[in-house]
Image (cartoon, rainbow, N blue to C red):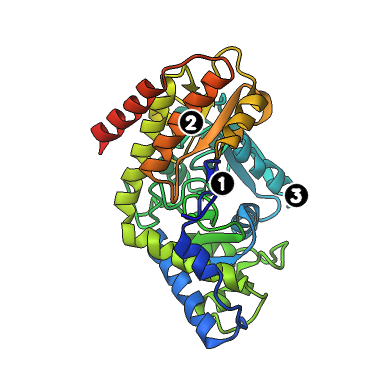
Amino acid sequence: MRNEDMLLIPGPTPVVDSIYDAMAQETRSHTDPRFTKIYKHAIEQTRDMFKTDGEVFVIAGSGTVSMEMALVNTVAAGEKILVISQGYFGDRFIKLGEAFGIGVETLQSEWGKQVTPEQVKAKLDSGNFKAVTITHADTSTGVAADLDALVPIIKKHGALVILDGVCATAAMEEDMSKTYGNPDYKIDVILTGSQKAIGVPPGLAIVAFNKTALAAREQIERVPAYYCDIYNWIPIMNDPGKYFATPPVNLIYAYDEGMKLVLAEGLEKRYERHKAFGKAVRAGLAVYGMKALAEEDAAASTLSCLLYPEGIDDAEFRAALAKKGVIVAGALAHLAGKAFRIGHMGNTTEQMLEKAVELIGDTLNEVGHKVETAKAVERFKEKLLAIV
């Protein structure tokens, strides 16, 4: 990669040269057959990744746009959703729901822990919810949702499952054809962005609806949106030569290349790689006294939130680490200054992560917290070898 830094934040993530090269191609008209062919292929690859029986949407926007598109096309004003929140980004659905007159109730876990299936069942027993939102991997905490436990409960209560895959898609299993104990128990909507585990620069909102979710849209007489109304986008997704709003031509080039890499690696192999990377990074950093916020059985494969040992100054540590070419992110909300977040997803490699573990140790020693760097690197390699 020709990146100057190792961008190990929860997103954007490192971009490989072939994606940069694709993005640098000549900008063409959004109706040029040479572009529309690429756009169509990108859409087809998205459908292959999610395995949906409905529609997929690849449009200009952020993960927040994809959240809005998922919500307003399935839940009408006056209807009610349950938000399963395991961190800062789960909470974003609360504000979105309120903005569109949707009733919102929330189940919030302690940061670092999962909402339990028992809590979800009790909440769904108490009210009539049109949909339940789940953040697959919360970017603030590094906590992953247990879909095998949650999806059957939600579907048994007749609610739609809306999955926020922004920090999970292409790294953690998100299969819309998968049944969870019953042929009708499936994920109904998945929303994501381009800049995390897919490994493409930011700027694309990506959403997939199954047939059940599309039927929910049919029941809504008027969606309180224009750009995010899927009825304005379905004709374009089926024929990219048609026009609704100008697509980000060069970013579509990049996304098409990124999706080629995702599918060429193989989804199952990719899921296992990310799982191994996460476990190995956490094991290596534990040698330094850095404890992961999430317990291992609830930890995401894509990023980790690490609590500092006593006496580490967050700003000083991250600045010193950045001078060595490793960029990590600060923690959010009440954890600000007490922890940092490291991404291990997308185009990251074993060599990059091993080097990051080493440089984190060097930086700790530099700021006066003495650690055994070689021991941590060895632990990283041992853990990775044991899993792989």
**Residue 297 spot, x, y in % from top left:** 38, 28
- Residue closer to the observer: 98 or 203: 203
**Residue found at x 57% / y 32%:** 321
**Residue found at x 40% / y 56%:** 176
**Residue 334 spot, x, y in % from top left:** 67, 24
CA gap, disc 1 and disc 2 = 20 Å
Quick one: label 3, few (<14), some, or many (20+) residues within 10 Å? few
**Residues at badges 1 and 2 in contact (C-beta under 8 Å)?**
no
- Residue closer to the observer: 47 or 185: 47
Quick one: label 1, few (<14), some, or many (20+) residues within 10 Å? many
Q: Amino acid at mark 1?
A: Gly
Outermost bottom residue? 33
**Residue found at x 35% / y 61%:** 263
Residue on which disc 1 sits: 11
Tell which circle, 3 or 1, labels the residue nearer the N-terminal end: 1
Residue 83 in which image quadrant = top right
Q: Amino acid at mark 3?
A: Ala
User: Of tags 3 and 1, which is closer to the observer?
Assistant: 1
**Residue found at x 56% / y 78%:** 235
Tell which circle, 1 or 2, labels the residue nearer the N-terminal end: 1
User: Of tags 3 and 2, which is closer to the observer?
Assistant: 2
Give residue 359's mark.
2
Instruction: Decide if residue 82 is in sight here.
Output: yes
In the figure, 198 relative to 125: above or below?
below
Q: Amino acid at mark 2?
A: Leu
- Residue closer to the observer: 311 or 345: 311
Q: Left or right? Give the position of 129 relative to 245.
A: left
Instruction: Decide if residue 307 is in sight here.
Output: no
